[in-house]
Image: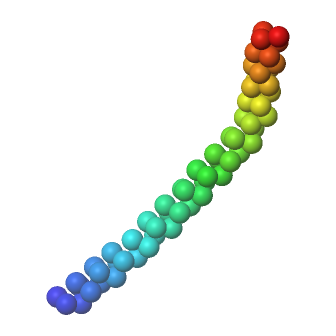
Amino acid sequence: MIKATNKRLVLKRKEDGASLIEYAVIAALVVGIAVAAFAVLGTGLDTAFDAIIAKITAATN
């Protein structure tokens, strides 16, 4: 009986470790995707804001 209980504890610990690694991999993927999205959208947003600023500046002059 004690042997079975010990085996359950060992298996439970292994599952917890795997979950931590899985969460770390998922978090790294999310960060990577966010960085890539900001890099791609960054130039487009910069161009859009520059156009808005130019129109506002032209309207006030």
The image shows residue 40 at horizontal and vertical percentages of 75, 38
View extreme (front): residue: 61
Does residue 51 appear in this view?
yes
Q: Quadrant of the N terminus?
A: bottom left
Answer with the quarter of the image where residue 9 lies: bottom left
Question: Residue 3: percent from the left, percent from the top?
Answer: 24, 90
Up the image or down, 29 lies above or below 2; here it is above
Asked if one can make out residue 55 in the rendered structure from this viewpoint, the answer is no
In the image, 52: left or right of 17?
Answer: right
- At 46% from the left and 67% from the top, the residue drawn is 20
Q: In the picture provided, is 35 more to the left or to the right than 57?
A: left
The image quarter containing residue 4 is bottom left
Nearer to me, 46 or 17 = 46
Seen in the picture, residue 23 relative to 41 is either above or below; the reply is: below
| Quadrant into which the C terminus falls | top right
The foreground one among 39 and 28 is 39
Farthest residue, direction left: 1
**Residue 8: x percent and y percent?**
28, 79
Q: Is residue 18 left or right of residue 41?
A: left
